[in-house]
Image: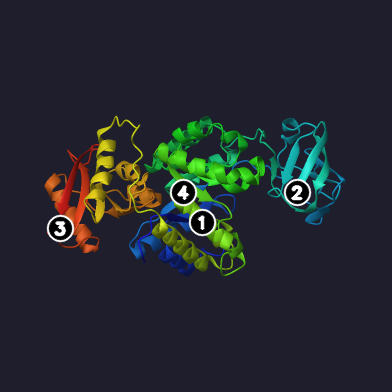
């Protein structure tokens, strides 16, 4: 399989959780497996995680596991007939106090705080914006609305407020329990739904560290940007996270579809500037839930995210519940490869106004520059935590980056870094031995051969996190 810089995140579900299908999609190019904690039990997630670990071990390649928390349930209740048809101009009541099943005139709410969060004139968008209601009156627990855009509304569909402003906390009691499950299965990343501020991410990190202490595990944190309130707080959220997800579904409902493409580009750019990971998600290959080939628009969408420099592109229902999970992964991998091949092969190091206060960051930048202009076959980073490889991956460099670590947890965590191929190898405490072993490892994997030039970085003394302080250019004997 050709080497691909952009990584693929695939969601596990009924369509992809069998051992045979999971092995097939991993072979096809999945780098990160997403466990959606909105569905399934703790045991379901543990079983799926165990299967991912077993199959990735069988294939000789580690993949990362991302636990995606459900977040607050801002949803309508259930209907007596399972669904209703809302008609333009008709009244419709959202009643937080209603226990009875809903009908064409009214429905209960899972989100009991909605009457406190809205006022007359507000616009509510249901079912991903397909249903539009205007609030006419709020009385006690009741939100009176008039239907502006009608259609079919079924059980438990989501509610968004245009422009944002719903007060639900990012972390619910269920999320706190799910964090414990995620730490027990040693999820490499935890994705936090609906954060509004850096405080939400800081709380999630504290909960992960407390729950992970018993398992000696600390995950990376991904902030899912899907609330309007998160946009002005984006840089603070980035600083408090290890990465962000451009979660275009709920975000588009709150800020409007037209605003999302520019926001996507801005978020990818800011993530690079802050040395963070970025995932582009939601409806990337949506038509392939039902069809064996994508639309031309979907191909362009995935390719544009690649050209913008996203670390990863994500599949949700396409692999969780779609008819063609394997074909979808193959199509996405092919699109990524084609977009990367068409990309400008020049080195882009936009560091004219950037100051490096750390030696390891300076070494990482020096490796990119030197490797490119020496025509190196590879850039190799001997890394304990993966930080050096992350810094290298923030820039568009046509030379593949191989990150060699002795820690499986670091290898898995680096699986999502753009243009980084993480490798596991026991590293000697002696520098010269470690460098010699690394070259043997690369030759054994046919990454380099006699006569090839490669750049390699490491730290002295060996094994000190954040200690990368040496760059060496080597020619394979």
Q: CA distance from mark 4 to mark 3?
A: 34 Å
91 lies left or right of 321: right
142 lies left or right of 443: right
Judge depth for marks 2 and 1 and give the one in front: 1
Is label 2 in contact with label 1 (beta carbons under 8 Å)? no
Callout 2 secondary element: strand
Task: Please tell me which residue is depicted at 44% across the width and 33% down the height of the picture.
Answer: 239
Can the viewer see residue 429 in this picture? yes
Looking at the image, tell me whether mark 3 or mark 1 is earlier in sequence order.
Answer: 1
Instruction: Residue under label 1, please give it.
Output: 302
Task: Please tell me which residue is depicted at 52% across the width and 34% down the height of the picture.
Answer: 234
Looking at the image, tell me whether mark 4 or mark 3 is earlier in sequence order.
Answer: 4
Looking at the image, tell me whether mark 2 or mark 1 is earlier in sequence order.
Answer: 2
Is label 1 in contact with label 4 (beta carbons under 8 Å)? no
Q: CA distance from mark 2 to mark 4?
A: 32 Å
Q: CA distance from mark 3 to mark 2?
A: 63 Å
> Would you call the spot at circle 3 few (<14 residues within 10 Å), some (14-19), or many (20 or more)?
some
């Amino acid at each position: 399989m050709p080497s691909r810089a952009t990584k693929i995140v695939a969601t596990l579900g009924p369509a992809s959780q069998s051992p045979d299908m999971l092995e097939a999609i991993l072979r096809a190019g999945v780098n990160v497996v997403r466990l959606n904690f909105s569905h399934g039990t703790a045991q379901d997630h543990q079983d799926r995680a165990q299967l991912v670990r077993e199959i990735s071990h069988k294939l000789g390649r580690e993949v990362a596991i991302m636990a995606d928390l459900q977040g607050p349930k801002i949803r309508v209740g259930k209907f007596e007939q399972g669904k209703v048809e809302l008609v333009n101009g008709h009244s419709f009541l959202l009643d937080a106090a209603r226990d009875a099943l809903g009908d064409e005139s009214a429905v209960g709410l899972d989100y009991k705080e909605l009457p406190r969060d809205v006022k007359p004139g507000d616009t509510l968008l249901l079912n991903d914006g397909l249903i539009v209601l205007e609030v006419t009156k709020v009385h006690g627990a009741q939100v009176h609305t008039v239907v502006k855009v009608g259609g079919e509304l079924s059980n438990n569909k989501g509610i968004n407020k245009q422009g944002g402003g719903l007060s639900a906390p990012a972390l619910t009691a269920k999320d706190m329990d799910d964090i414990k499950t995620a730490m027990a299965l040693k999820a490499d990343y935890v994705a936090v739904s609906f954060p509004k501020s850096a405080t939400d991410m800081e709380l999630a990190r504290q909960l992960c560290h407390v729950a992970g202490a018993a398992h000696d595990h600390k995950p990376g944190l991904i902030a899912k940007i899907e609330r309007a309130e998160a946009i002005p707080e984006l840089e603070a959220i980035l600083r408090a996270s290890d990465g962000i997800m451009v979660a275009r579904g709920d975000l588009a409902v709150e800020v409007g579809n037209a605003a999302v493409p520019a926001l996507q580009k801005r978020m990818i750019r800011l993530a690079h500037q802050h040395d963070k990971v970025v995932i582009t998600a939601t409806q990337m290959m949506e038509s392939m839930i039902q069809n064996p080939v994508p639309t031309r628009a979907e191909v362009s969408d995935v390719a544009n995210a690649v050209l913008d420099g996203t670390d990863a592109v994500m599949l949700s229902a396409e692999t969780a519940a779609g008819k063609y999970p394997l074909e979808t992964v193959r199509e996405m991998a092919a699109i990524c490869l084609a977009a990367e091949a068409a990309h400008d092969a020049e080195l882009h190091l936009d560091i004219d106004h950037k100051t490096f206060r750390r030696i390891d960051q300076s070494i990482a930048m020096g490796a990119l520059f030197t490797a490119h202009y020496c025509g190196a076959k590879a850039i190799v980073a001997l890394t304990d935590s993966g930080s050096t490889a992350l810094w290298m991956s923030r820039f568009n460099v046509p030379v593949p980056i191989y990150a060699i670590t002795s820690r499986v947890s670091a290898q898995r965590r680096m699986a999502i870094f753009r243009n980084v191929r993480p490798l596991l190898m026991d590293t000697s405490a002696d520098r010269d031995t470690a460098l010699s072993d690394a070259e043997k490892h690369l030759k054994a994997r046919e990454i380099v051969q006699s006569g090839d030039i490669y750049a390699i970085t490491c730290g002295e003394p060996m094994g000190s996190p954040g200690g990368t302080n040496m760059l060496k250019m080597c020619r394979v004997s």
